[in-house]
């Protein structure tokens, strides 16, 4: 059994709460699968977006701190682009959709064989891509307004800029079950399998400025591990590799261990369960504010101070 099976989720620092909901559910058509709070700072929401079930490898999560938060800066030592996977036949649909919603984007480009992509940014400047391919057999969320054949299927890859990707690549390939999938001039693609949702792209960018955390940047990337036992085995490997990590943290829907990879990006090892339906019915995921036990006594206070949001809809 592999200790790491692919990507689990990406977590970003964002701004306005309603704009965050509008973009990921209204424009991209993802499902809001959980409305909770930051488990380290309960005065801020933590939103989870994904497919119908919140399947690991489909999940984008955000901490919307508000418009007053200073902007971050893309650069080396950061995960700068989160890529979503869609069908190759869906390109015209998404180009028209971005035009409809006045979302700026770069013209389609090709990267590796059988793969085209569009770069865009969300309302906070977070770097995103749609990657058009025929490798992904996952079913996207049928939200009722984006034709299911055009729906986002899940994460495709994450893109990390580094001064030199050698040590990060060594960590991923020798300790985290990744192998080399593809290479180009300054880019190496690693993956646990050659399937969307399993990839990490490392770029050598020595001339880039160092990235700065803030609004519109990624906080961390989580890798999926099957269960608590494989998570423990993974932490033992990190110990032998000489990387410090946190204790196991209970995130209610999974458990997590965090550590900095050699290039400075925060990595997480997250279990694939118990899942997002432990406290809500599948049909009503994301509708109510769900809190961990330690914050239940603050529920009325949190409901009072957290921004009011409209339930996600295409028309906003």
Image: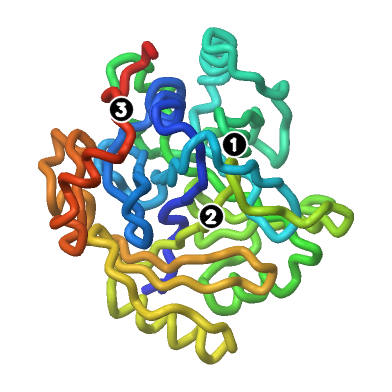
Question: Measuring 29% from the left and 62% from the top, which residue is drawn there?
Answer: 251
Front one among 141 and 289: 289
Indicate the quadrant containing the N terminus: top left, top right, bottom left or bottom right: bottom left
According to the picture, the residue beneath numbered tag 1 turns out to be 128
Q: Earlier in the sequence, mark 2 or mark 1?
A: 1
In three-dimensional space, the C-alpha distance between marks 2 and 1, rounded to whole angstroms, equals: 14 Å
As drawn, 100 above or below 184: above
Front one among 296 and 222: 296
Q: Residue 262's quadrant in the figure? A: bottom right
As drawn, 96 above or below 239: above
Question: Measuring 82% from the left and 53% from the top, which residue is drawn there?
Answer: 209
Question: Measuring 29% from the left and 45% from the top, which residue is drawn there?
Answer: 54
Q: Are marks 2 and 1 in contact (CB under 8 Å)?
A: no
Q: Nearer the viewer, mark 3 or mark 2?
A: 3
The local secondary structure at tag 2 comes to strand
- Image coordinates of residue 129 in percent, x first then y, are 60, 35
Front one among 107 and 37: 37
Q: Earlier in the sequence, mark 3 or mark 2?
A: 2
According to the picture, the residue beneath numbered tag 3 turns out to be 309
In three-dimensional space, the C-alpha distance between marks 3 and 1, rounded to whole angstroms, equals: 24 Å
- Image coordinates of residue 16 in percent, x first then y, are 47, 32
The local secondary structure at tag 1 comes to strand
In the displayed structure image, the side of residue 153 where residue 144 appears, left or right:
left
According to the picture, the residue beneath numbered tag 2 turns out to be 219
Kindly give the residue lying farthest to the bottom in the view shown: 240
In the displayed structure image, the side of residue 303 where residue 212 appears, left or right:
right
Tell me the crowding category of disc 3: few under 14, some 14 to 19, or many 20 or more residues within 10 angstroms, Cα based: few
């Amino acid at each position: 059994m592999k200790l790491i099976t692919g990507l689990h989720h990406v977590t970003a620092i964002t701004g306005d709460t309603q704009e965050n909901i509008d973009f990921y559910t209204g424009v991209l058509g993802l499902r809001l699968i959980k409305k909770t709070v930051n488990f380290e700072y309960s005065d801020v929401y933590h939103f989870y977006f994904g497919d119908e079930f919140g399947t690991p490898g489909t999940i984008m999560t955000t901490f919307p701190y508000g418009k007053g938060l200073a902007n971050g800066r893309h650069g080396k030592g950061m995960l700068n682009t989160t890529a979503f996977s869609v069908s190759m036949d869906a390109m015209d649909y998404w180009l028209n959709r971005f035009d409809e919603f006045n979302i700026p984007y770069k013209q389609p480009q090709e990267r590796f064989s059988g793969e085209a992509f569009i770069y865009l940014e969300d309302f906070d400047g977070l770097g995103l891509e749609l990657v058009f391919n025929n490798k992904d057999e996952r079913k996207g969320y049928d939200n009722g307004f984006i034709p299911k054949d055009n729906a986002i299927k899940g994460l495709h890859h994450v893109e990390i800029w580094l001064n030199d990707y050698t040590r990060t690549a060594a960590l991923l390939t020798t300790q985290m079950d990744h192998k080399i999938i593809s290479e180009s001039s300054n880019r190496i693609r690693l993956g646990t399998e050659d399937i969307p949702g399993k990839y990490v792209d490392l770029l050598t960018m020595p001339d880039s400025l160092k990235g700065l955390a803030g609004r519109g940047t990624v906080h961390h990337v989580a890798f999926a591990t099957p269960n608590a036992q494989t998570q423990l085995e993974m932490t033992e490997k990190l110990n032998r590799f000489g990387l410090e990590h946190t204790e196991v943290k209970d995130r209610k829907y999974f458990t997590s261990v965090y550590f900095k990879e050699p290039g400075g990006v925060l990595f997480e090892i997250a279990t694939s369960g118990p899942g997002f339906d432990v406290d809500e019915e599948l049909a009503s995921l994301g509708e109510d504010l769900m809190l961990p036990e330690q914050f239940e006594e603050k529920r009325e206070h949190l409901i009072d101070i957290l921004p009011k949001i409209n339930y996600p809809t295409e028309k906003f």
